[in-house]
Image: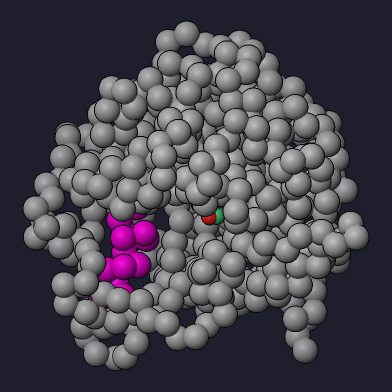
Amino acid sequence: MAIIEFPKDMKWGAATASYQIEGAAFEDGREASIWDTFCRIPGKVRDGDNGDIACDSYHRYEEDIKIMKELGIDTYRFSVAWPRIFPKGRGQVNQAGVDFYHRFVDALLENGIEPMCTLYHWDLPQALQDEGGWGNRSTIDAFVEYSEFMFKEFSGKIKNWITLNEPWCVSFLSNFIGEHAPGFKDLQLATDVSHHLLVAHGRSVKAFRALGVDGQIGYAPNVTWKEPFSDKQEDIDACKREVAWFVEWFMDPVFKGSYPQFMVDWFADKGVKMNIQDGDLEDISQPIDFMGINYYTGNVARYKEDNGLFSSEDLDMNYDRTDIGWPIYPEGFYKVLCYITELYGEVPIYITENGSCYNDEPVDGRVKDDRRISYLKLHLAALKRSMDSGVNIKGYLTWSLLDNFEWAFGYSMRFGIVHVNYRTLERTPKDSYYWYKQTLANGFYEL
Ligand code: GCO
């Protein structure tokens, strides 16, 4: 048995995202986002689910905040639905949408919970997608307009800002693999989108500094880890490419002002051209105050010619898997955090998402999700190992406070520490909620 203990000043929280929990999709002036559109294309989202109602947090946020307060978290990460603020993506502000976030943020502050606000967690206004979305550079300007508005409007209230959530998903998963909105399968487009996102991030950080907003700003890339199956150079290289697709591709430009050349060459080999304009890399590499890291899973992989984009294959090493099928790989959490620190120095890091999918249902009012508790214990131990090895961790926010709309999986996959009955919208804290509460109160747990 080991006692895993965390520093007293560590921040603890939970995370959600607007489209996944809010519902009220067309209320108070909000117009369609690309997810509203995508959900309506047959076959894209399991069971034809959509975010029209979701957890109805738009109306039930007071109840949700009570649940947070009772949990004892000091930070709550949520995202703002861009189409509530600018229904057409730019131009005319929708005051009713702005008022909603004021009520919500005020309620968090009254309950002593620090808001951590993500500006973009995937609900791009459909009006912007109609002009090419993130593939069109004009969306960069629209994002800067939206973020400047938010900085001014919520200055003094929100002190923790995240520009983008998981730019890898927004670019490659959504425009090359095609699993997420808008659902394209075009590597050139996806690469352009990845670059435009980074420029949008950098320009938004610039605006934040120019306005002199009191607070800190960063972004939240998702990462994974691939452990080479053997010491063969080809296995090592294949894993390096897979990891770099998440890490170096989205972090070198921010921290070093350049793209990783070995990846640029690899993409060039696939016919991809880098569409970079003068000043872009300078904009992207604005100093940031912290980085958010989202980690769920990793794997063992090896070289396989002509297999996928990077000539690699994942191996089934018989690791336990969560209900969504992802291998449980806490070692990868430790390794990728150490790797990031080795590459970019002791950047302050918040774990902005980490959690697991288990579809346990209430029995007599209780949800016994022991497997989620075990997942959390293993990953928090890996996190502590990384801290002891010099990784500069400031906080940990679990994904997710509530079961919610899990994108292409609809409501079939549950990541919450609080169960949501999608028929009655009743919330039931799970055993993992009580375990997390106890751990936060103690500052340690027994592994
Ligand atoms: C993410 C997503 C979350 C998912 C979670 C589980 O940022 O990928 O932000 O929205 O629900 O990762 O897949």
Front-most of residues 18 and 263 = 18
x, y percent for residue 128: 35, 23
Residue at 47% in and 8% down? 92
* Residue 19 at x, y percent in the picture: 57, 36
The magenta stretch spans residue 189:
no
Quarter assignment of residue 276: top left
Q: Nearer the viewer, residue 343 or 53?
A: 53
Percent position of residue 192, x then y: 23, 41
Q: Using the rendered image of the protein, determine whether residue 378 is visible from the camera's viewpoint.
A: yes
In the rendered view of the protein, which quadrant contains the N terminus?
bottom right
Tell which of 424 and 73 is nearer to you: 424
Q: Is residue 31 left or right of residue 263?
A: right
Instruction: Identify which residue is drawn at 22% across, 63% down.
Output: 309
Q: Is residue 239 magenta?
A: yes
Residue drawn where x is 28% and y is 42% of the image: 184
**Of residues 66 and 20, the one drawn nearer to the viewer in this rendering:** 20
Q: Is residue 432 left or right of residue 293?
A: right
Q: Is residue 207 above or below residue 370?
A: above
Name the quadrant of the C terminus.
bottom right
- In the rendered image, the vertical position of residue 290 relative to residue 93, given as above or below: below
Residue 191 percent coordinates (x, y): 23, 47
* The residue stretch that appears in magenta: 238-250
Q: Residue at x 76, y 52 (%)?
A: 419
Q: Residue furthest top?
A: 92
The answer to whether residue 218 is seen in the rendering is no
Query: Which residue, as the protein is rendered here, is positioned at the far right?
Result: 364
Instruction: State whether residue 274 is above or below residue 330.
Output: above
Helix, strand or loop: magenta stretch? helix
